Amino acid sequence: MKTPADKIIGLLGGKKAVSYICRTCLSSVYRWTYPKKRGGTGGYIPSRYHVRLLIYARSKGIPLEAADFFPKRLR
């Protein structure tokens, strides 16, 4: 099952592209996809990047919504 981070990173063109969009290092984007046991975020993108990613997606016509940052079971 894809995590919200996996889905969003895929939609936006991959980890390197998301790193550039968020103005953060590539290793941070990788950590978003790691489980918490491995020092990751458990598949979630930190909230400080949500608006930036939503604005970018809208400008490029990419179908990304705020609800995509959360698992379906919470919607």
Image: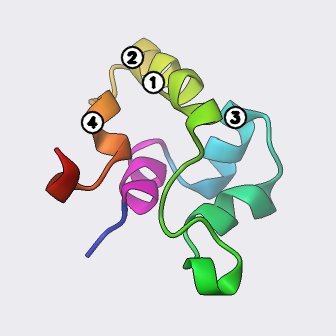
Is residue 47 in view?
A: yes
31 up-or-down from 69: above or below:
below
What is the spatial separation of the Cα atoms under label 3 and label 4, in whole angstroms?
19 Å
Magenta stretch? 4-12
Percent from the top left, x then y, of residue 29?
67, 57
Residue at label 1? 54
What is the spatial separation of the Cα atoms under label 2 and label 4, in whole angstroms?
14 Å
Q: Are marks 2 and 3 in contact (CB under 8 Å)?
A: no
Residue 22 is marked as 3
Mark 1 or mark 4, which is nearer to you? Answer: 4
Q: Secondary structure at mark 4?
A: helix
Left or right, 66 with reference to 23: left
Question: Which comes sooner in the sequence, label 2 or label 3?
Answer: 3
Question: Which comes sooner in the sequence, label 1 or label 4?
Answer: 1
- For the view shown, which residue lies furthest in the right direction? 25
Q: Are marks 1 and 4 in contact (CB under 8 Å)?
A: no
Taking depth in this image into account, of 60 and 35 the one nearest to the observer is: 35
Q: Could you tell me which residue is drawn at 54 percent across and 54 percent down?
A: 14
Left or right, 2 with reference to 33: left
Residue at label 4? 67
